[in-house]
Image (cartoon, rainbow, N blue to C red):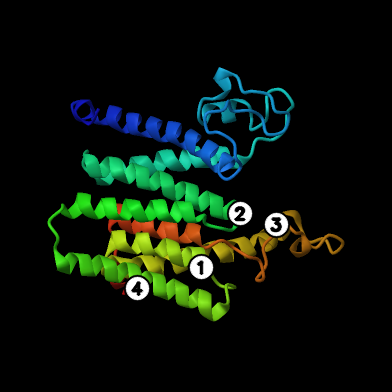
Amino acid sequence: MIALLEVLPVWYQYSFVALLGLIIGSFLNVVIYRYHTGKSLSGHSHCLSCGQTLRWYELFPLVSYVCLFGRCGLCGCTIPLRYFLVELSTSLLFVSVFSQMSLGILFLFSLILVSLLIVVAVYDIYHMVIPNELVITASVLSVVYFVLAYGFTLDIDILISHAGAALGAFFFYGGLWFVSKGKWIGFGDAKLALPLGFILGIPSVFTFVVFSFWIGAIVSVGLIGIPAIVRAVKGYCSRYPVVNYSKYFTMKSEVPFAPFMIVAFLLVYIYNLDVLQLMASFI
């Protein structure tokens, strides 16, 4: 497939990768919904409200959601926006990987890694936990990455660099978990940092850690600021104080941290960003 893709026009290559991302994203939605529920991944997709099996023309990624206006064609109940966002995000990430990597085994590996991390991020958002099975899978993929990137010839210096990055990330996040007694960060986040740090190595793991907190801070402040934005748009009403609505975030709200870690990791992994160089460019 890779050999055939290389001889095709660039626009076709990007279109193929984007379409592949949409299809994989649709499958990831099934995995996320059915994971740890005992349901088979081979079952037919159906409406979560009325249970009606979806017809073939309702299964096209993104297109079906838009054409149905985000609602079930039978009962009219709202289809979770998550389905649309997961499919779109997977497609965009696949294209991002394709734009930065040459076609090859490492490219295919990266698509698998991205798919797994999307499942981890969304699952953590909805359930506030990172299953051990997903962490173990990520750990196995980190070893596969090391072999693909450096071969079977063992270079002790490179191995120490990646192992040190993994342990450093683990103990840093684990330390935050220990000091805060799980209030600032979960232990699952610390465990996830092991394979992510091992893939990045030193010094990229430093950028990964810094970015995770920068992204977390930006998103958290944005979520907390939503009530103020709503008040500014709709006007202040003392009878219905927006900040008391349960759907809004406050300083005490619990926010999953794994998505911030994963976004930070992907920025470093795909684009090879360096936080020190970025800071130096603004000084």
Q: Look at the picture and state if 194 lies above or below 49.
A: below
Alpha-carbon span between mark 2 and mark 3: 27 Å
Could you say whether the residue bearing mark 2 is in a helix, strand or loop?
Answer: helix
Mark toward the viewer: 3 or 1: 1
Q: Earlier in the sequence, mark 3 or mark 4?
A: 4
The residue at which mark 1 appears reads as: 187
Alpha-carbon span between mark 3 and mark 1: 34 Å
Crowdedness near tag 4: few (<14), some (14–19) or many (≥20) residues, C-alpha within 10 Å? many
Residue at position x 58%, y 45% in the image: 36
Q: Earlier in the sequence, mark 2 or mark 1?
A: 2
Q: Is residue 179 left or right of residue 202?
A: right
Residue at position x 55%, y 50% in the image: 123
Give the residue at the far front of this rendering.
Answer: 38
The residue at which mark 2 appears reads as: 127
The residue at which mark 4 appears reads as: 168
Could you say whether the residue bearing mark 1 is in a helix, strand or loop?
Answer: helix
Alpha-carbon span between mark 2 and mark 4: 27 Å
Name which residue type carries label 3. Answer: Val
